[in-house]
């Protein structure tokens, strides 16, 4: 079974960039990394523009990702994340050429 790999690219409102990173670290990363099947969950920032960010996720199975997206806390924190975004996020679901 293939792992699920996601790159989520987003632009955060510049004045919200630091608050977004703090919220993401404290609420999303800590919770997501403890979930079943989470192999990687990180937030990366562009070196030249701190408001451009990328979430890197690797899940063991599609079922693990589905459970992640169905978490009760996600329904609370998801809208807060969206309110800090300057543009709609871009989700890229990737597969390895080695799978």
Image (cartoon, helix red, strand yellow):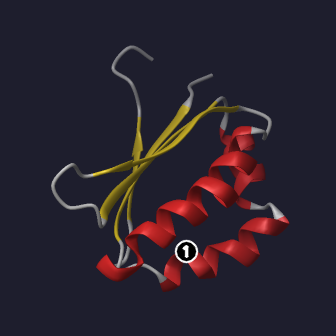
Q: Is residue 86 visible?
A: no
Residue drawn 63% across the image and 48% down it:
29
Q: Between 72 and 61, which is closer to the camera in this rendering? A: 72
Looking at the image, residue 48 sits to the left or right of residue 30; the answer is left
Residue 21: % across, % down: 48, 61
Q: Quadrant of the N terminus?
A: top right
Give the number of callouts: 1
Residue 60: % across, % down: 66, 29
Q: Between 44 and 75, which is closer to the camera in this rendering? A: 44
Say which residue label 1 marks.
81
Residue 12: % across, % down: 36, 73
Q: Quadrant of the C terminus?
A: top left
Residue 67: % across, % down: 78, 51
Q: Is residue 92 visible?
A: yes
Residue drawn 69% across the image and 60% down it:
27
Residue drawn 70% across the image and 47% down it:
30
Q: Residues within 10 Å of mark 1 (few under 14, many from 20)?
A: some
């Amino acid at each position: 079974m293939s792992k699920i790999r996601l790159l989520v690219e987003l632009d955060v409102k510049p004045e919200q960039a630091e608050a977004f990173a703090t919220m993401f670290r404290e609420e999303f990363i800590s919770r997501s990394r403890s979930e079943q099947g989470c192999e990687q969950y990180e937030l990366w920032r562009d070196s030249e523009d701190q408001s451009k960010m990328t979430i890197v996720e690797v899940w063991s199975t599609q079922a693990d990702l589905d459970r992640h997206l169905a978490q009760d806390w996600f329904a609370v924190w998801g809208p807060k994340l969206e309110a800090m975004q300057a543009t709609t996020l871009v989700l890229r679901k990737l597969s390895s050429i080695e799978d």
